[in-house]
Amino acid sequence: MKSRPICSLLLLVSLALVVNAQERKKMKIYISADMEGVVGVVTNEQLGPQGFEYQRFREFMTQEVNAAIEAAFEAGATEIVVSDSHGNGQNLLIEKLPKNILLVRAWPRPLMMMQGIDETFAGVIFMGYHTGTTNQQGVRAHTISSARLADVRLKGVSVSEAGINAAIAGHFNVPVIMVSGDDAVVKETSALLGDVEGAVVKWASGFHSAKTLMPEAAYQLIREKVKKAIGRIKDFKPYKLATPIQLDVRFKNYRPSEVLGYLSIVERTDAHSIRFTGTDMIEVSKFLEFIVTYEPSLEP
């Protein structure tokens, strides 16, 4: 008879351990990695294969992502998916990433920079991000395509890539918990999403200039901010847009809006602009990927 309280206590402890284990299984973190916001990046010379510094800055981008991964695991994450979301989507040095993550590479992708996100994730981290195309500040400020797009709006509000991607995550009820990049993108993203953690690795002084931390200092700051974000992950709320979702896109040239206006699902609202209404952010994402990717000469 006297052993019953002990048995009951052991049962409660066992149940608590099971619950804790189940909670840990849910700690999946999604990392969407761009390059314009990486420490030291200021011009095209760091951003693409033709640039004389690109190969070196692939290393810095990879190390920033690794710093975030390491910190996330230390803070309690059990699964991590990383999306290589800059340029050709083949920037991160795959052999230098940890073996216990999954990596999304190359294009096209229905969910663009958020391919692989779903309702099982606990939080999203934006690494190396930049401001949107209508922002007058920020290194390499643009939205999706600096060459083609002058503005992207969701439900009438001009948005950056961070805003678009936060809305995609919000579709799955997943919040953004942190952003890294220059001071302008941290300010812009916080204004839209609220009190997300921000790792400022450089301070923009122009479209192609900035005062920057050194790489090791950036990695340490990123680790600190990731741990802080995961430590208060329950404070963050998903960025959810009411459906249907009106998408307005303004092109820098005339013909894209003219030709897209031939489609019955598209309204040409002025010489440079079109409007598409999606049932949700998944449809909006697919449409955006289509208009910036499709070419009749696509092969294979």
Image (cartoon, rainbow, N blue to C red):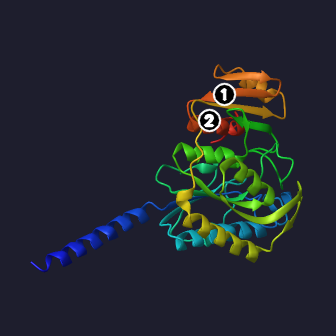
- Location of residue 218 by image quarter: bottom right
- State which tag comes first along the sequence, 2 or 1: 1
Query: Element at badge 1?
Result: strand
Find the distance from the CA under tag 2 to the CA under tag 1: 8 Å
Classify the position of the N terminus by image quarter. Answer: bottom left
Which residue occupies the foreground of this view, 221 or 63? 221
Left-right relation of 161 to 167: right
- Which residue is depicted at the point 65% across and 41% down? 299
Which mark is on residue 276? Answer: 1
- Location of residue 243 by image quarter: top right
Left-right relation of 114 to 267: left
Q: What residue type is disc 1 on?
A: Phe
Which residue occupies the foreground of this view, 191 or 24? 191
Which mark is on residue 125? Answer: none
The x and y percentages for residue 225 are 65, 68
The x and y percentages for residue 267 are 71, 21
Look at the numbered discs 2 and 1 and tell me whether their residues touch, using CB distance below 8 Å.
Answer: yes
Q: Name the residue beneath numbered marker 2.
A: 284
Classify the position of the C terminus by image quarter. Answer: top right
Left-right relation of 121 to 246: left
